[in-house]
């Protein structure tokens, strides 16, 4: 049963990766990459690696997604300032 659950999570991760690569919207790509990291942390937890799961959730899913969203907002702000001039 656990193997089936891991396979399902793996398939969802592959679909999220395809969405992240093929998406023309940067926000969608950032959220998809965050979902990939979150699902990876769930798989690590199922495989009895809670320390790796916590690290992946904190750094991979949390911090990286926040940094990417911050960078995207800064780029949009700079582009808006350039367009206004």
Image (cartoon, rainbow, N blue to C red):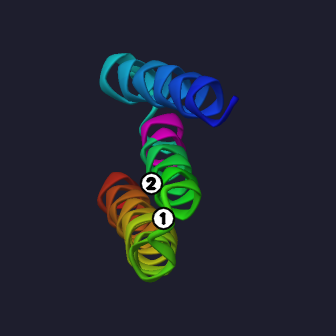
Image coordinates for residue 32, horizontal then vertical, percent: 50, 39
Q: Quadrant of the N terminus?
A: top right
> Start and end of the magenta stretch?
28-32
Q: Is residue 8 magenta?
A: no
In this view, the residue in front, 68 or 51, is 51
User: Where 39 sits versus 1, above or below?
Assistant: below
The local secondary structure at tag 1 comes to helix
Image coordinates for residue 73, horizontal then vertical, percent: 46, 65
Q: Which residue is mark 2?
A: 37
Badge 1: how crowded within 10 Å, few (<14), some, or many (20+)?
Answer: many
Image coordinates for residue 49, horizontal then vertical, percent: 44, 71
In this view, the residue in front, 85 or 25, is 25
Q: Quadrant of the C terminus?
A: bottom left
- Residue appearing at x 55%, y 63% in the figure: 45
Q: Is residue 29 magenta?
A: yes
Q: Which residue is mark 1?
A: 61
- Residue appearing at x 52%, y 24% in the figure: 7
Badge 2: how crowded within 10 Å, few (<14), some, or many (20+)?
Answer: many
The local secondary structure at tag 2 comes to helix
User: Where 65 sits versus 50, above or below?
Assistant: above
- Residue appearing at x 50%, y 20% in the figure: 11
User: Which residue of the protein is positioned furthest toward the front in this rendering?
Assistant: 1
Q: Whole-Å distance between the Cαs marked 2 and 1?
A: 5 Å
User: Where 41 sits versus 40, above or below?
Assistant: below
**Which mark sits nearer the N-terminus, 2 or 1?**
2
- Residue appearing at x 48%, y 64% in the figure: 61
In this view, the residue in front, 16 or 9, is 9
**Does the CB distance between marks 2 and 1 fall below 8 Å?**
yes
């Amino acid at each position: 049963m656990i193997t089936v659950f891991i396979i399902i999570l793996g398939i969802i991760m592959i679909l999220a990766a395809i969405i992240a690569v093929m998406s023309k919207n940067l926000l969608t790509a950032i959220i998809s990459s965050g979902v990939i990291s979150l699902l990876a942390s769930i798989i690590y937890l199922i495989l009895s690696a809670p320390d790796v799961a916590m690290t992946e959730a904190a750094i991979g899913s949390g911090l990286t997604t926040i940094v990417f969203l911050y960078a995207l907002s800064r780029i949009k702000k700079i582009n808006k300032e350039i367009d206004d001039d």
